[in-house]
Amino acid sequence: MAGDTGVISLGQDGLISKWTLNNQKHWQYAKVLDIGKEEAIDLAYMRDRIAVAFPRLGVKVWLWIKGTWQPQRSILRQNVTSIRFVEDGEALLGGTSDGVLWHCQVPNGTLRAYTFLKSKVHGLDINSQGTQVLVSQAGGRAHLVNVQQSDSKGKIEQVYTTKDGEPAVDQRHSFAASFASTGRAVVFGSMENHALVWDKSKGDVVCSLDHGEDEYVQAVASFDRSTRAENCHIVTGTKQGLLSWWKPPLLDN
């Protein structure tokens, strides 16, 4: 949530909930929406709008209007696997199981395909400027795609994979690519219990985060809101329950 005041979550029971910190630094729970029992695959949230992706139904959208969450026109695109709000919440980006990256204004826009990739999209991450998206794919490959409003939108600007084309990820414990170090770095892939950190522009691995023997990385997050890279952090979580904070490498613009 805005200002790090809370967390929005989607449960397997179909409830969208929020956890917020009160003045006593205690977490308080509140129900936001009940989306029903239909299987949901991903949640996107920005201030006064919520979107939920359903493999069979497409994407449902709600706006906060006059004190209630009111349903809007759905985006009727099946097999959606990941969604993110862009353009200050005025549009959604989505990825599908057949490798399509799409864009749609909400709540009444037209869905447009941006990029056609070769395998399932399993994660999206947007940079702070909203101009680039990291598209993680099944098979251990991630793409940096331009999504700004220009003639180059949908253009693949960089690919993150090993030099010989082999997947840059342990398939048993994969996580989606994430921007880090004020957008200069990308965290993606793990090899032999090391999470890989890439130079965003050059597409080269600049360092790896060693988690020790038998620690399999399965989740990554980045604290990347500072304008100074030295004040940023990477957070990783392993299957065995190890949570680690890392200083990202300092890279050129």
Image (cartoon, rainbow, N blue to C red):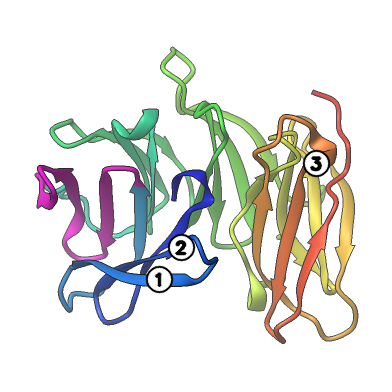
Q: Find the magenta span and give its range.
A: 46-73
Magenta segment main secondary structure:
strand
Q: Residue at x 13, y 48 (%)?
A: 67
Q: Is residue 125 rendered to the left or right of residue 98?
A: right
Instruction: Kindly identify the amino acid type of the residue bearing the numbered disc 3.
Output: Asn
Q: Residue at x 25, y 73 (%)?
A: 15
Indicate whether residue 57 is drawn in magenta. Answer: yes
Instruction: Kindly identify the amino acid type of the residue bearing the numbered disc 1.
Output: Gln
The front one of 195 and 113 is 195
In the rendered image, the residue lying farthest to the front is: 24
Where residue 203 sits, quadrant-wise, is top right
Where residue 110 sits, quadrant-wise, is top left
In the rendered image, the residue lying farthest to the top is: 151
Q: Give percent across and percent down for residue 242.
A: 75, 79
Q: Which residue is mark 3?
A: 231
Instruction: Kindly identify the amino acid type of the residue bearing the numbered disc 2.
Output: Asn
